[in-house]
Image (spheres, helix red, strand yellow):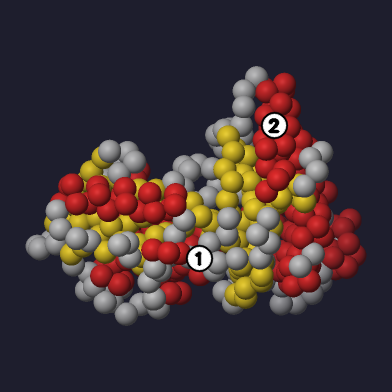
């Protein structure tokens, strides 16, 4: 767990880090250790995780900064810098806070204690610039970042994969959100100028180069709350499982859509509900797109990579049916901008963000085109977040 040095941090990152550090000093006094825990994007591979498939996430330059130090006794004190709120709890009595944000941290402590780790009391102040509800997984940045920090602070000896699994369980079991493992994995294992291909069944991973200084990702936020995402997510899971059950009558050993070939699916199409067939076809194609996109990156062919992003959106819109008009308009607007290589919806769907692969010189044109189309259709503007690929969670030192 080698620390980053100050020279690695960008100006905006140093500003956010100093803000967390200053908040800790003001609230608690003393000198804490400081950790940077990034948000993430997923470039391609949507709704494949719960089908044992592949995803292609990356850590980004938006991050949560966690200042933490040990404390006497059993009382833990935490401060959310950006909210201007604090919370305290006792290590011997871990309960939900009644507010959302403390539960992400309490859940991590709960998981550490359940596995017998000798975690002590501590004081913590955290804040940063990962946007909330924009698809960059601020919750995983808090959970995995704190798990990493406490592991270092108390010398618990957990390896990085242990921390990923622990952070995921904190959200599943304490917060009560049935998330997959991709967010926490990208947070811990992210690498500078690289994307991470994750096998969601085996948890094997590999890095692929994403080293174009003139190329970044732009998130366009519809600002649509995803009310349908949770219920429809469960529906899609059931439909995929139904398809596997039907096809397993013809081929032994099928555990998930990961094991289903397109030939097998098409051979038994008439036996499947037409909607179930479309769901299964999308997942099989999307897994193939992830693998092909990795080949594109290996060749440095970002144009081909961008085309696969756009094909992913078409599948999510037409076959998986988790897009919405707001997302579609943003993708359509991006398609007309020179210097945009590809664009798609990102996340569960029915709102949230699109992600676009964009040359630096085209960012302004994308924002103008997307804002114009969105205002014309809905009378308001989307939000934009421009990002670069950065490393995963690490300890940092500031002079």
The x and y percentages for residue 157 are 32, 80
Q: Quadrant of residue 373?
A: top right
Give the side of residue 359 with respect to residue 391, left or right: right
Which residue sits at x=71%, y=38%?
366
Residue behind mark 1:
391
Q: Is the residue under label 2 in contact with that under label 1 (CB below 8 Å)? A: no
Q: Quadrant of residue 372?
A: top right
Q: Quadrant of the N terminus?
A: bottom left
The x and y percentages for residue 169 are 41, 63
- Between 361 and 319, the one lying in front of the other is 361
Q: Quadrant of the C terminus?
A: bottom left
Q: Quadrant of residue 337?
A: top right
Residue lying at the far left of the rendered structure: 73
Describe the element under mark 2 as helix, strand or loop. helix
Instruction: Mark yes or no: residue 246 visible.
Output: no
In this rendering, the answer to whether 332 lies above or below 217 is above
On residue 368, the disc is 2
Which residue sits at x=77%, y=51%?
341
Real-space CA distance between mark 1 and mark 2, rounded to the nearest whole angstrom: 30 Å
């Amino acid at each position: 767990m080698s620390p980053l040095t100050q020279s690695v941090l960008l100006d905006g990152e140093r500003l956010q880090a100093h803000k967390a550090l200053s908040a800790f000093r003001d609230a608690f006094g003393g000198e804490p250790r400081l950790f940077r825990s990034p948000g993430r994007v997923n470039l391609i591979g949507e709704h494949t995780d719960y089908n044992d498939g592949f995803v292609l996430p990356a850590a980004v330059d938006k991050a949560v900064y966690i200042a933490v130090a040990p404390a006497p006794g059993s009382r833990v004190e935490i401060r959310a810098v950006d909210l201007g709120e604090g919370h305290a709890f006792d290590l011997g009595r871990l309960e939900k806070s009644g507010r959302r944000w403390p539960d992400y941290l309490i859940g991590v402590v709960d998981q550490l204690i359940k596995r017998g780790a000798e975690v002590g009391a501590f004081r913590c102040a955290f804040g940063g610039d990962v946007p909330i509800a924009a698809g960059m997984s601020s919750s995983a940045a808090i959970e995995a970042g704190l798990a990493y920090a406490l592991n270092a602070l108390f010398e618990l000896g957990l390896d990085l994969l242990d921390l990923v699994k622990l952070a995921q369980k904190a959200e599943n079991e304490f917060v009560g959100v049935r998330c997959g493992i991709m967010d926490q994995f990208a947070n811990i294992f992210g690498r500078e100028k690289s994307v991470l291909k994750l096998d969601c069944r085996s948890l094997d991973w590999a890095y692929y180069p994403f080293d174009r200084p003139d190329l970044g990702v732009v998130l366009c936020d519809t600002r649509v709350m995803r009310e349908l995402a949770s219920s429809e997510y469960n529906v899609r899971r059931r439909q995929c499982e139904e398809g596997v059950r039907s096809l397993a009558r013809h081929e032994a050993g099928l555990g998930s859509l990961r094991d289903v070939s397109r030939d097998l699916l098409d051979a038994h199409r008439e036996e499947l509900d037409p909607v179930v067939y479309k769901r299964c076809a999308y997942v099989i194609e999307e897994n193939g797109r992830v693998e092909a996109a990795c080949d594109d990156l290996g060749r440095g062919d970002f144009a081909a990579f961008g085309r696969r992003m756009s094909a992913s959106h078409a599948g999510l819109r037409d076959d998986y049916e988790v897009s919405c008009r707001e997302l579609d308009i943003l993708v359509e607007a991006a398609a007309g901008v020179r210097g945009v290589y590809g664009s798609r919806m990102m996340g569960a769907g029915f709102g949230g963000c699109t992600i676009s692969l964009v040359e630096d010189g085209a960012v302004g044109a994308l924002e103008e085109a997307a804002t114009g189309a969105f205002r014309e259709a809905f009378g308001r503007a989307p939000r934009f977040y421009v990002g670069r690929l950065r490393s995963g969670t690490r300890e940092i030192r500031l002079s």
